Image: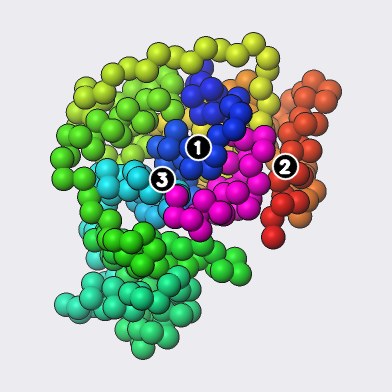
């Protein structure tokens, strides 16, 4: 059974937002509201303001990471993460599909970002004076990120912002030059947060080839499995939580007859009710109202504290 302790879902006391990100290696952050709720699932005391404070303080950084998707990473970990997850093949293809071309694309987007602080897509469209629009702008920023020149800033009125890495972090992100060292660090962090797991799981989570994942695996020592805690642990996990995304297969955590209710297709992944490491239902929210749809009857009162804590956390959102 997957370890909820390795994933910090037993909610160890006093962990900061930055410590949670470091312990997990990186945290899926494609959807920021869901990412914030992933911190809540791992801490009884963190508030949205605490996470956003760590983000504004540049302790955690939102950027392209494992699998080429947006993640929160600890600022200290950016060199080795960048060394292993950066790629530009798809970026260049997508730029071409968006009609964005030229030999000056990198200096174009770097110049638009440099010295400006966090900018929205609309801000950048104006600065680029017609050279790129819509998703073409996002792919241009991704190109800059590939070269260590851009990350995402905090949301502004619910919209993503983009910022020059040197302005935000003090210097561009320089990838770890020792690839073996980076691979070892990746595997150590992954194995610490994902138990049990195999190289195939690491490849699926990181986006590396299976061969590279096996090399990384061989460089790292196995972490002893965390002790199984006695009480049943119930958690309301957000969509795209690392517990759902961190392994190649989800078969161990959801029964086949319930798979479509959790993963209906089209890239949708619903928030789930996790009971002792197994998905027992789905849930949703509208404002501060939380609704739970279990797959089967659950013990009375099992989720009361979790529902109250989700409300506590949401009440702290601006």
Label 1, label 3: how far apart the Cα atoms are:
9 Å
Label 3, label 2: how far apart the Cα atoms are:
25 Å
Residue that mark 2 sits on:
310
**Is residue 50 magenta-colored?**
yes
Instruction: Please provide percent x and percent y for residue 262.
Output: 60, 38
Q: Residue at x 33, y 61 (%)?
A: 170
Q: Residue at x 27, y 61 (%)?
A: 172
**Is residue 312 magenta-colored?**
no
Residue that mark 1 sits on:
20
Instruction: Please provide percent x and percent y for residue 301.
Output: 83, 25
Question: With respect to residue 31, does 255 lie above or below?
Answer: above
In this view, the residue in front, 298 or 147, is 147
- Say which element carries label 2: helix
Q: Residue at x 21, y 24 (%)?
A: 219
Q: Residue at x 36, y 59 (%)?
A: 169
Residue that mark 3 sits on:
74
**Left or right, 175 with reference to 25:** left
Question: With respect to residue 18, does 161 lie above or below?
Answer: below
Q: Earlier in the sequence, mark 3 or mark 2?
A: 3
- Magenta region's main secondary structure? helix
Neighbor class of circle 3 (other Cα within 10 Å; few <14, some 14-19, many 20+) is many
- Say which element carries label 1: helix
Q: Earlier in the sequence, mark 1 or mark 3?
A: 1
Instruction: Please provide percent x and percent y for residue 293.
Output: 74, 36
- Answer whether residue 159 is visible to the viewer in this image: yes
Question: With respect to residue 113, does 53 lie above or below?
Answer: above
Which quarter shows the C terminus? Answer: bottom right
In this view, the residue in front, 2 or 315, is 315
The stretch of residues the image draws in magenta is 31-59
């Amino acid at each position: 059974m997957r370890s909820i302790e390795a994933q910090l879902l037993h909610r160890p006391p006093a962990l900061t937002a930055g410590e949670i990100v470091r312990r997990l290696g990186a945290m899926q952050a494609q959807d920021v509201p869901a990412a914030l709720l992933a911190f809540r699932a791992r801490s009884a005391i963190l508030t949205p303001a605490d996470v956003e404070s760590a983000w504004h303080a540049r302790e955690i950084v939102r950027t392209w990471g494992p699998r080429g998707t947006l993640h929160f990473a600890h600022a200290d970990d950016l060199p080795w993460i960048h060394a292993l997850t950066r790629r530009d093949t798809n970026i260049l293809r997508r730029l071409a599909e968006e009609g964005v071309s030229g030999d000056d694309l990198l200096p174009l987007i770097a110049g638009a970002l440099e010295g400006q602080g966090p900018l929205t897509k609309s801000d950048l469209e104006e600065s680029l004076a017609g050279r790129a629009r819509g998703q073409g702008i996002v792919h241009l920023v991704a190109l800059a990120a590939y070269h260590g020149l851009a990350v995402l800033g905090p949301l502004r009125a619910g919209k993503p912002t983009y910022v020059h890495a040197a302005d935000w972090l003090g210097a561009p992100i320089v990838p770890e030059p020792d690839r073996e060292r980076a691979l070892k660090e990746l595997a150590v962090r992954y194995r610490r947060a994902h138990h049990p797991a195999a190289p195939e799981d690491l490849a699926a989570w990181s986006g590396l080839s299976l061969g590279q994942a096996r090399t990384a695996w061989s460089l790292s020592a196995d972490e002893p499995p965390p002790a199984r805690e006695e009480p049943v642990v119930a958690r309301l996990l957000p969509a795209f939580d690392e517990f759902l995304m961190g392994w190649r297969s989800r078969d161990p955590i959801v029964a086949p007859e319930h798979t479509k209710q959790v993963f209906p297709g089209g890239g949708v992944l619903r928030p789930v009710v996790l009971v002792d490491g197994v998905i027992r239902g789905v849930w949703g929210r509208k404002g501060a109202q939380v609704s739970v749809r279990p797959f089967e009857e659950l013990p009375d009162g099992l989720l009361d504290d979790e529902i109250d804590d989700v409300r506590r956390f949401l009440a702290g959102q601006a």
